[in-house]
Amino acid sequence: MSAPRVDGRVERGNRTRQSVLDRTVGIASVEGLEALSVGRLAAELGLSKSGVFALFGSKEELQLATVREAGRIFTERVIRPLAADPAGVLRVWRLCEGWLEYSRGRVFPGGCFFYEVIAEFDARSGPVHDAVVRAQRDWSAHVERTVADARDAGELHAGVDVPQLAFELVALMETANGVAVLHGEETAYRRARVGIAARLRAVAVDPARVPQVP
Amino acid sequence: MSAPRVDGRVERGNRTRQSVLDRTVGIASVEGLEALSVGRLAAELGLSKSGVFALFGSKEELQLATVREAGRIFTERVIRPLAADPAGVLRVWRLCEGWLEYSRGRVFPGGCFFYEVIAEFDARSGPVHDAVVRAQRDWSAHVERTVADARDAGELHAGVDVPQLAFELVALMETANGVAVLHGEETAYRRARVGIAARLRAVAVDPARVPQVP
């Protein structure tokens, strides 16, 4: 009879862990990862401090788990929906649109989780900085790969500068997030889409494949 | 004999105030405005806590004075050097170049001061948020005005979408700062310059006026 009891405990621990992370990704997206404290989370979630501590061990572990959880949600919302789409310029466009929707729809209450924590940890060092850097590299690499796939599928001119284009697309997306969250206005998302459409049309073999921005 | 003594005190107070602000803009550019504390500054600068407190009154006042000081330095480094330049596409280019140099040269140790504190305060409310929003609006407005002046001087096509172009230029600059500070690499500055040059050439009446990026 001991196995089921252990399973029950593990399951309870997992549920508690998830409820803590549901809260920390939200807090960190608004206030940053330094705002996470075991005491505050215990109080807000009606848990014991020792219980939260037992699950995460340290503030740094809590921050790292929060970065991983945000990465999981990001992948679920932005990357996975396009997994079955064929390579091409439309897939690049949809990836950018999906990202802008992720920011605009406030999947995280403070806008893009990574925009917030990158600014917080960019000039520091340590494991949290490294995790944030890795997440940003993974995203840039994914945009680059999606652009390269579109070129390899014959939908972008062969001579397209892939890292340059990816950099420009990411710049438009991230700035839209920053401006929209700061000023509470949505014009920035339209400007990003207009810019992204122009960049893609300039390098597309068939520019008509890039949707018009209404 | 009392006037000179008062002047001496005022001058001493101003010097102390300036030495505090020299330190706070640096700290805030790396760690954010929340990292400013009267106790820490007093300890680091060898001042009394009550002395620092007397000069700034509260942590919020210290944060607001720090935002103003960063704005003053920014104006001095990025805006003022171009004050005498004639309106035109080259002035837009030089403004962007000056901004990238301001970021690359680490005028603030954490890169662009405002990039850091905007991410920190974007989703909050209060006087510090408002000051940061104002600083960002002032900068965007300055870029827009510089672009509009170039158009009015006949150097950009009359139909150029000024806010759209300004948004795209700012996006390239800010993302270069973000990526360069995060990854400690300089490629991003070159990518920004390539993108800015391409944007300006696309709307310049005489594209040859836009310098080649080496």
Image (cartoon, coloured by chain):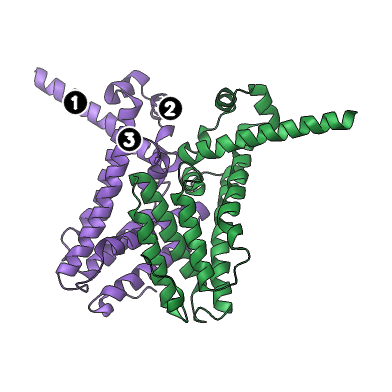
Chain colours: A purple, B green
Chain letter of the residue carrying label 1:
A
Return the residue at label 1. A10
Chain containing mark 2: A
Identity of the residue drawn at 54% across and 68% down: B91
Q: Who is closer to the viewer here, B154 or B137?
A: B154
Label 1 SS: helix
Q: Is residue A100 left or right of residue B140?
A: left
Q: Earlier in the sequence, mark 2 or mark 3?
A: 2
**Local SS, label 2:** helix
Q: In x, y percent, where is residue A195?
A: 38, 69
Residue A128: numbered disc: 3
Looking at marks 1 and 2 on the same chain, the residue that comes earlier in the sequence is marked by 1
Mark 3 vs mark 1, CA separation in Å: 26 Å
- Give the foreground label among 3 and 1: 3
- Whichever of labels 3 and 1 marks the residue nearer the N terminus, that label is 1
Q: Chain of mark 3?
A: A
Residue A69, located in which quarter of the rendered image? top left
Would you place residue A194 above or below residue B12 in this image? below
Given the image, on which type of amino acid does mark 2 rest?
Arg
Q: Which residue is mark 2?
A: A40
Q: Nearer the viewer, residue A94 or B93?
A: B93
